[in-house]
Image (cartoon, rainbow, N blue to C red):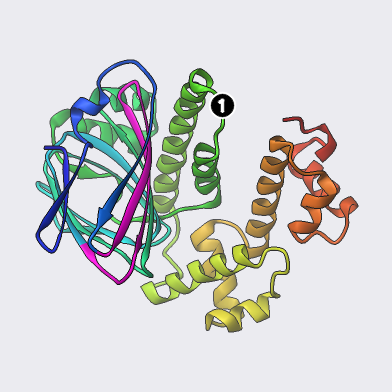
Amino acid sequence: MGFEFKNEGKPFKMAFDEDSFKGRDFKDEVFKIKLPDGELSSKQWIFDGIKILYAEADLDRPAELDWTGDTELVSMHFNLQGSTSIQQDGMNGTFELKKNQHNLFYGTQASGKMRFDELKMKSFMIQFQKDAFLDISKNGNESLQRFADKIVSGSPTAFSDSNLNIDLSQLNCIRSILNCDYSAGLKKMFFLSKTIELLVLQAESFHNSRFSAAAYLKYDEDKERIIFARDYLVKNMESPPSLIELAKIVGINEYKLKRGFKEVFHQTAFSYLSDLRLELAKNQLLEGKKQATEIAFELGYCSLQHFSSAFKKKFAISPNQVRP
């Protein structure tokens, strides 16, 4: 059966079954599904027992989709917008991935609800056939090895008992996949390297959370405000507010904003913003459509000299040395 979605009792079947992984050819597919109250669109790439899937949904009103699946897969979930609940047969409890959260799951029988918040959902997922995942993860850290042992035993499991926050390095990796414009042969190599990189980042983030000190942010409401602060900075990166102004905007004090942001994203708010600007600048330079001066001012740098200095400090080359 693969995966089946239902809204108000009406089924919408999607080809996420095991047969779709077969073959050695690189597959690049786009599809759209009309829903009663909107549309679900998706891009997917399939190669060597791996499927990369990016999905967006736009609805006219809030809704839920019931979903079920019966395919043995290892799935890396990155919830970029909206929330998804997952009830996995053989696992205790329900996992709910909220905005900006990720986790890694293995199972054969699953069900749950996909909820659409703010009338929009964005989700990124990498799915592996069991053998493909075990081959890639065989030299991983202790946490990844324990997860692999559960897979070998056939025990449905989640990588982390609690979902983790998507950090900037993971987000940049996802963006590089979605924005990749290599030809099919090079794209397959690039996607495989980025799949491994994202798995490494995910395994490391779990390891760090497991051995870190007790969390400073105790309540989901505070975590959501930190996510909102990040989103506000990203939307206003060309003219960002001060830390005091940002704290007022999100409704928490400056101290909690500073401590909370570093706990969630592993760096300060303006270090995050600086890294994001420079990563975006590098990608735009590689595209070759804009000059460094134009990029610098669009991203909020006060001068080309300031931009060039920051760029060279991060990447060890000047903007003019970047070639598409």
Residue in the picture at 20% in, 32% down:
151
Q: In this view, does 285 lie to the left or right of 75?
A: right
Q: Is residue 91 above or below residue 244?
A: above
Q: Is residue 227 above or below residue 74?
A: below
Under mark 1, the amino acid is Tyr
Residue in the picture at 66% in, 46% down:
279
193, 188: nearer the viewer: 188
Residue 240 position, x and y percent, is 70, 69
Residue 129 position, x and y percent, is 25, 28
Residue 118 visible (yes or no): yes
Q: In this view, does 272 lie to the left or right of 92?
A: right
Task: Examine the image and state in which quarter residue 127 appears.
Answer: top left
Span shown in magenta: 37-64
Residue in the picture at 77% in, 50% down:
295
Residue 121 position, x and y percent, is 37, 59
**Residue 60 on the magenta segment:** yes
